[in-house]
Image (cartoon, rainbow, N blue to C red):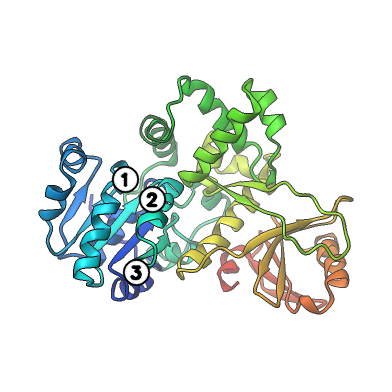
């Protein structure tokens, strides 16, 4: 079966930055399409995967000799497996000073970022590639089906390009993640406990991150949970959304909210076996919110921009699901999975607009329906159109 080529929105930014910087780094979760994207953009550049044991051994044992094999530069995939290569790459690009020499990719964010900031500061452009955005999916495969199917299936490219059943894809994905990525980040003795922890996190996506509660439910220490959260964050399984600092003289919560970066992976960990189960699932709202927050992040990352997303919640329960910080302007976004608009959906935005005053010019409600509207100055967007933010 021939695979469908899916055009990625990050392509233009990747091409542009490769003409400005000697090193460009593309990081994102395993199977998000990094290798496919980079190989397609840099067709004439040698490709080396450091997941191949012989290549990794060469890079580890003789980094200078390894890089000498590629005098004009190369694509180095899963480069975080040989982090001391960065120092040698620094020496090469300082000597030659030619844009687009090395294209680095990896499925671990903070390990890669830490080494890059130490050795390649000012020489490297950093890009994030998450799974497909709804825009990329629609432009590649045409009309999408139901919201429930999208939530259930998730957005990893191979699900669409190779038409893989999510019931086959995600269990293998999780097993590969546990055996390769988790072990390479931290030596966890009991992977069964870690897998239970991931499932517990899936049940908390869209909620405040309560380390003590997770510690009790998983039967491990508070510090262990903190360490494990860092692993999930570093490997792009979850994203921590932090509260916005603007308090408007209200006492605010300080804990971040935990979100999975893909609703399909979340559904798999929740043991959802059919898309129809989502309609009546007790966590339907959380699954939908997880999907939308991920889409809003993709909108930023696909432009090469940093995330500007926060949430806002005071101590008495008033909450805005997402705040887009645009400098002088804060844009509140409420996320509701319901397909029918009702007045209850606007209460938090209306409250927030009163206390925010002139700092808020636009406000949005993203919901599970299909029609765009405007009510009381609030823009109502269907889930497919959340990219306009």
Read off the residue under disc 2: 115
Quadrant where the image shows the C terminus: bottom right
At which x and y percent is residue 78?
30, 47
Residue 106 vs 376, above or below: the answer is above
Q: Residues within 10 Å of mark 1 (few under 14, many from 20)?
A: some
Residue depicted at 52% across the width and 44% down the height: 233
Q: Pick the residue in front: 152 or 230.
A: 230
Read off the residue under disc 3: 14
Regarding mark 2 in the picture, which secondary structure is present there? helix
Regarding mark 1 in the picture, which secondary structure is present there? loop
Q: Is residue 274 visible?
A: no
At which x and y percent is residue 300?
52, 67
At which x and y percent is residue 272?
56, 36
Q: CA distance from mark 3 to mark 1?
A: 22 Å
Whichever of labels 3 and 1 marks the residue nearer the N terminus, that label is 3
At which x and y percent is residue 5?
29, 61
Residue 71: mark: none
Q: Is residue 295 visible?
A: yes
Q: CA distance from mark 3 to mark 2?
A: 21 Å
Whichever of labels 2 and 1 marks the residue nearer the N terminus, that label is 1
* Snapshot quadrant of residue 23: bottom left
Whether residues under marks 2 and 1 lie with C-beta atoms below 8 angstroms apart, the answer is yes
Regarding mark 3 in the picture, which secondary structure is present there? helix
Read off the residue under disc 1: 83
Q: Pick the residue in front: 324 or 366.
A: 324
Q: Residues within 10 Å of mark 3 (few under 14, many from 20)?
A: many
- From the image, state whether disc 3 or disc 2 is nearer to you: 2
Residue depicted at 22% across the width and 72% down the height: 98
Q: Pick the residue in front: 3 or 57.
A: 57
Query: Image check: 359 left or right of 203?
Result: right
């Amino acid at each position: 079966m021939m695979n469908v080529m899916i055009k990625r929105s990050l392509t233009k930014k990747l091409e542009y930055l490769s003409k400005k910087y000697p090193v460009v780094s593309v990081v994102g979760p395993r199977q998000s399409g990094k290798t496919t994207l980079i190989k397609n953009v840099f067709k004439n550049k040698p490709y080396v995967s450091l997941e191949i044991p012989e290549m990794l051994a060469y890079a580890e044992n003789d980094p200078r000799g390894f890089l000498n094999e590629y005098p004009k530069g190369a694509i180095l995939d899963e480069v975080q497996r040989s982090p001391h290569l960065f120092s040698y790459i620094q020496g090469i690009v300082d000597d030659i000073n030619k844009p687009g020499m090395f294209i680095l990719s990896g499925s671990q964010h903070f390990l890669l970022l830490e080494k890059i900031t130490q050795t390649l500061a000012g020489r490297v452009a950093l890009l994030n590639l998450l799974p497909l955005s709804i825009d990329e999916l629609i432009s590649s495969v045409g009309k999408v089906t139901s919201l429930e199917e999208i939530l259930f299936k998730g957005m990893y490219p191979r699900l669409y390009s190779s038409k893989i059943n999510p019931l086959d894809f995600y269990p293998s994905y999780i097993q590969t993640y546990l055996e390769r990525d988790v072990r390479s980040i931290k030596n966890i003795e009991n992977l069964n406990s870690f897998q239970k922890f991931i499932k517990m996190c899936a049940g908390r996506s869209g909620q405040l991150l309560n380390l003590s509660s997770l510690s009790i439910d998983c039967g491990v220490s508070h510090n262990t949970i903190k360490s494990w959260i860092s692993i999930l964050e570093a490997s792009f399984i979850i994203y921590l959304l932090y509260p916005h600092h603007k308090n408007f003289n209200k006492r605010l919560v300080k804990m971040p909210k935990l979100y999975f970066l893909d609703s399909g992976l979340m559904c798999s960990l929740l043991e959802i076996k059919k898309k129809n189960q989502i309609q009546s699932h007790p966590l339907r709202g959380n699954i939908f919110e997880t999907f939308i927050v991920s889409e809003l992040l993709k909108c930023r990352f696909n432009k090469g921009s940093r995330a500007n997303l926060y949430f806002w919640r005071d101590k008495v329960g008033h909450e805005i699901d997402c705040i887009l910080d645009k400098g002088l302007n804060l844009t509140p976004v409420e996320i509701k999975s319901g397909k029918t608009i009702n007045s209850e959906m606007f209460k938090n935005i209306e409250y927030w607009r009163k206390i925010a005053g002139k700092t808020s010019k636009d406000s949005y409600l993203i919901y599970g329906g299909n029609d765009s509207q405007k009510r009381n100055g609030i823009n109502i967007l269907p889930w497919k159109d959340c990219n306009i933010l």
